[in-house]
Image (cartoon, rainbow, N blue to C red):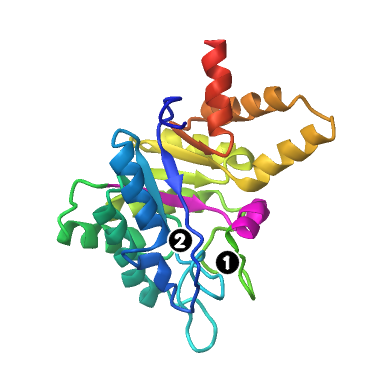
């Protein structure tokens, strides 16, 4: 249906049958996302397939990387695992690799691994500006990826941080990112506009599960016009400067806009 409606692409996340401390299902060549990519590209080769790269959906503890014996996310030990996952997605046929883990240096590690594996032309869309947001709750519940202890503030950005955003973007571009993402989108439209004004690469923005769920809940209670708020929320994100919008409304808004124009 996404292909028929002419959407720009799909972003895949996986919920594996088995999770462990090292998140091995995330870089398994026969993992759930790897299988999905192969099937989609076999049946719909024209549809752009983007694969999220993170370990949180695959680790038993729910953190974005592997842990030290003290229970702290081990940034450097996580990099080769994230790079390995990216290569398996590339081998399966992914068109864009999208690292969302926020480990320092992960774009460079992934770019090097892809180049070494013969995928030098494969694009990377980095979650360069990802805040430690309260808006991720519904996704974490659906993906069973909430941290079993602690939080992700050690590697995700403080919601009050503004200047740091450009530093994160520039570092990821220096390491080889082809486009950058701001997440969440709606509460951070000022950041989208800031990034858009400073870079000459595509800027993506992710309208996350909490943003989507707030609209759905308000509409279910009869408090807002669901379709109107859906379109207006996405229009605001586009107006802020996003070239690409990732949203759970994608199929529906494509139908609405298709009827309107």
Q: Name the one closer to the observer, 216 or 207.
A: 216
* Residue 178 makes an appearance in the image: no
Residue at 46% across, 25% down: 5
Q: Name the one closer to the observer, 156 or 17.
A: 17
* Residue 113 makes an appearance in the image: yes
Residue at the far bottom in the pictured view: 69
Circle 2 crowding by C-alpha within 10 Å: few under 14, some 14–19, many from 20: many
Of callouts 1 and 2, which one flags the residue occurring earlier in the amino acid sequence?
Answer: 2
Residue at 57% across, 59% down: 143
Distance in Å between CA atoms under marks 1 and 2: 10 Å
**125 over 71 or under it: above or below:** above
**95 over 22 or under it: above or below:** above
| Magenta residues, start to end | 123-142
Q: How many marks do you count on the picture?
A: 2
Q: Residue 152 carries which label?
A: 1
In the rendered structure, the answer to whether residue 126 lies left or right of residue 130 reads left
Q: Is mark 2 on a helix, strand or loop?
A: loop
Q: Does the magenta stretch include residue 131?
A: yes
Residue 43, x across and y down, in percent:
32, 39
Q: Name the one closer to the observer, 177 or 199.
A: 177
Q: Is mark 1 on a helix, strand or loop?
A: loop
Q: Which mark is residue 46?
A: none
**256 over 16 or under it: above or below:** above
User: Circles 1 and 2: CB distance less than 8 Å?
Assistant: yes
Residue at 43% across, 77% down: 22
Q: Mark 2 points at which residue?
A: 102
Residue at 33% across, 36% down: 44
Circle 1 crowding by C-alpha within 10 Å: few under 14, some 14–19, many from 20: some
Residue 80, x across and y down, in percent:
31, 71
In the rendered structure, the answer to whether residue 208 lies left or right of residue 1 reads right
Residue 21, x across and y down, in percent:
48, 79
Q: Is residue 75 magenta?
A: no
């Amino acid at each position: 249906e996404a292909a028929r409606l002419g959407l720009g692409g799909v972003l895949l996340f996986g919920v594996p049958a088995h999770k462990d401390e090292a998140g091995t299902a995330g870089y398994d060549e026969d993992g759930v996302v790897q299988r999905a990519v192969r099937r989609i590209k076999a049946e719909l080769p024209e549809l752009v397939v983007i694969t999220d790269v993170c370990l949180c959906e695959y680790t038993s503890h729910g953190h974005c990387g592997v842990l030290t014996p003290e229970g702290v996310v081990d940034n450097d030990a996580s990099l080769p695992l994230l790079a390995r996952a990216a290569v398996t997605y590339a081998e399966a046929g992914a068109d864009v690799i999208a690292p969302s883990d926020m480990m320092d240096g992960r774009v460079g590690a992934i770019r090097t691994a892809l180049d070494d594996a013969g995928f030098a032309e494969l694009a990377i869309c980095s979650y360069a500006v990802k805040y430690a947001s309260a808006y991720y709750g519904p996704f974490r519940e659906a993906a069973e990826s909430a941290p079993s202890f602690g939080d992700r503030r050690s590697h995700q950005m403080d919601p009050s941080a503004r200047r740091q955003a450009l530093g994160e973007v520039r570092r990821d571009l220096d390491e080889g990112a082809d486009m950058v993402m701001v997440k969440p989108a709606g509460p951070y439209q000022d950041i989208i506009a800031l990034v858009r004004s400073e870079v000459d690469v595509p800027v993506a923005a992710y309208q996350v599960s909490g943003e989507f769920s707030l609209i759905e809940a308000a509409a279910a209670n009869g408090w807002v016009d669901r379709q109107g708020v859906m379109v207006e929320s996405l229009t605001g994100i586009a107006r802020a400067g996003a070239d690409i919008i990732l949203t759970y409304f994608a199929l529906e808004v494509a139908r609405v806009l298709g009827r309107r124009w």
